[in-house]
Amino acid sequence: MAATEKSLLAPSKLAAILASGEDGQMIRVSGQQHLPASAEIVRQRLTQMHWLVKQMPHLARVESVAEDSARFVVRPGFSFLRGEMTVYLQRLTESSELAWQMEVRGIGSSAQAVVRCNLQEDGEEACQLHYEVKLEQVGGLLRTLQGSLLRAAVDKTVQDFLANLQNSLGPSKPSQD
């Protein structure tokens, strides 16, 4: 049976948490980010798996990278989640949007998420990245966390990824009013 969904307030300026199951297992984080590159350039970069993996927060090492998948290890910086976690990233074939399936495994913990993105031009050399991260399943020790703590961890990870993405694309140009 599906968990009952309820609306929640966003914990940050850029991300809005849309829904959460009562047991904390289903979390959706969405928002948008202005990026200092055209939608074409951003799409091209986000489809290059080796480049995408380098943007991951807390990246410890890359184990393998193929055209549509990667396996890498992260060391999350959360006090409640120490040690290494292995991430399996698989690009999903979608027509107009970018999408990935993520499976995360650590000692005594696991999670599965789907990430979807759309790009919209925002001037000549800029675009808006619209994203949604849906944490579909958590297991092990992650299952014991309060929903608010897990939501904050997802939001922080998304914000760190977006900061890495923005930095790697180059500085934003000042607007000319």
Image (cartoon, helix red, strand yellow):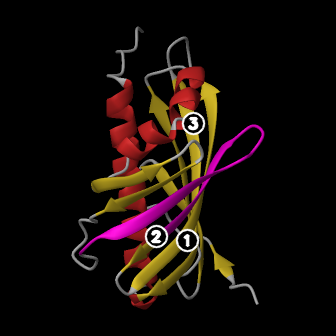
Q: Residues within 10 Å of mark 1 (few under 14, many from 20)?
A: some
Residue at image coords 32%, 32%:
167
In magenta, the rendered stretch is 83-103
Query: In this rendering, does residue 12 appear at all?
Result: no
Chain-order first, disc 1 or disc 2: 2
Q: Residues within 10 Å of mark 2 (few under 14, many from 20)?
A: many
Q: Nearer the viewer, residue 127 or 51?
A: 51
Q: Residues within 10 Å of mark 3 (few under 14, many from 20)?
A: some
Residue at image coords 43%, 23%:
36
Instruction: Give the CA separation, mark 1 to mark 3.
Output: 20 Å
Q: What number is the disc on residue 112?
A: 1
Task: Using the rendered view, name the quadrant where residue 81 is placed.
Answer: bottom left
114, above or below 149, in the image: above
Prevailing SS of the magenta stretch:
strand
Q: Position of residue 29 (x, y in %)?
A: 53, 60
Instruction: Give the CA separation, mark 1 to mark 2.
Output: 6 Å
Q: Secondary structure at mark 3?
A: loop
Q: What number is the disc on residue 47?
A: 3
18, above or below 54, in the image: below
Judge whether residue 157 is colored magenta.
no
Image quadrant in which the N terminus is located:
bottom right
Determine which residue is flagged by label 2.
Answer: 104
Q: Are marks 2 and 3 in contact (CB under 8 Å)?
A: no
Is residue 151 shown left or right of residue 93? left
167, above or below 113, in the image: above
Q: Amino acid at mark 1?
A: Gln
Chain-order first, disc 1 or disc 3: 3
Query: In this rendering, does residue 107 appear at all?
Result: yes
Residue at image coords 57%, 47%:
131
Judged from this view, the residue extending furthest toward the top is: 176
Q: Are marks 1 and 2 in contact (CB under 8 Å)?
A: yes
Instruction: Give the CA separation, mark 2 to mark 3.
Output: 20 Å
